[in-house]
Image: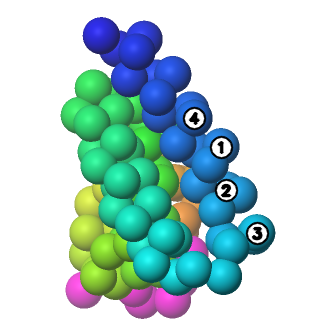
């Protein structure tokens, strides 16, 4: 099951990085972001740190979701706890800018 989700996830990541570069249809991009979020959540539930970091990014910038620094921080913290360097650096930038911290 995990292998199947991982393959689907990798396809989503590949498409996610290219959607919008060749499309003027904003609704297509929004729909894809919504689907990508669903797959990232499924993979994150299985412990995939990369998916957790991508969810953190989506919440940090409001891509496909309502922008929410607190949720971004939570996802980055989960991924960082698994050793994800990108998430660790994002947490540092969030602290530096006072985003999602009290």
What residue is pinned by disc 1? 14
Q: CA distance from mark 4 to mark 2?
A: 10 Å
Query: Is there a contact, CB below 8 Å, between mark 3 and mark 2?
Result: no
Q: Secondary structure at mark 4?
A: helix
Q: Please tell me which residue lies in front, 16 or 76.
A: 16
What percent of the width, then of the height, locates residue 59?
37, 72
Residue at figure coordinates x 47%, y 28% from the top left = 8
Q: CA distance from mark 1 to mark 4?
A: 5 Å
What residue is pinned by disc 3? 22
Q: CA distance from mark 3 to mark 2?
A: 11 Å
Can see residue 100?
Answer: no
Q: CA distance from mark 1 to mark 3?
A: 14 Å
Q: Is residue 94 magenta?
A: yes
Residue at figure coordinates x 27%, y 60% from the top left = 74
Residue 29 left/right relative to 86? left
Q: Is residue 78 above or below residue 32?
A: above
Q: Please tell me which residue lies in front, 97 or 6.
A: 6
The residue carrying pointer 2 sits among few (fewer than 14), some (14 to 19) or many (20 or more) residues within 10 Å by Cα, namely few
Residue at figure coordinates x 26%, y 69% from the top left = 71
Query: Is there a contact, CB below 8 Å, between mark 1 and mark 4?
Result: yes
What residue is pinned by disc 4? 11
What percent of the width, then of the height, locates residue 79?
40, 44
Q: Secondary structure at mark 1?
A: helix
What percent of the width, then of the height, locates residue 62?
41, 80
Query: Is there a contact, CB below 8 Å, between mark 1 and mark 2?
Result: yes
What residue is pinned by disc 2? 17
Q: CA distance from mark 1 to mark 2?
A: 6 Å
């Amino acid at each position: 099951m995990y292998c199947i989700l991982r393959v689907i996830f990798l396809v989503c990541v590949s498409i996610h990085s290219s959607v919008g570069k060749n499309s003027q249809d904003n609704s297509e991009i929004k729909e894809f972001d919504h689907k990508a979020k669903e797959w990232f959540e499924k993979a994150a539930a299985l412990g995939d740190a990369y998916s957790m970091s991508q969810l953190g990014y989506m919440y940090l910038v409001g891509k496909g979701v309502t922008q929410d620094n607190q949720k971004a921080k939570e996802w980055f913290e989960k991924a960082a706890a698994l050793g994800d360097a990108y998430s660790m650096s994002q947490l540092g930038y969030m602290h530096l800018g006072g985003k999602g911290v009290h």
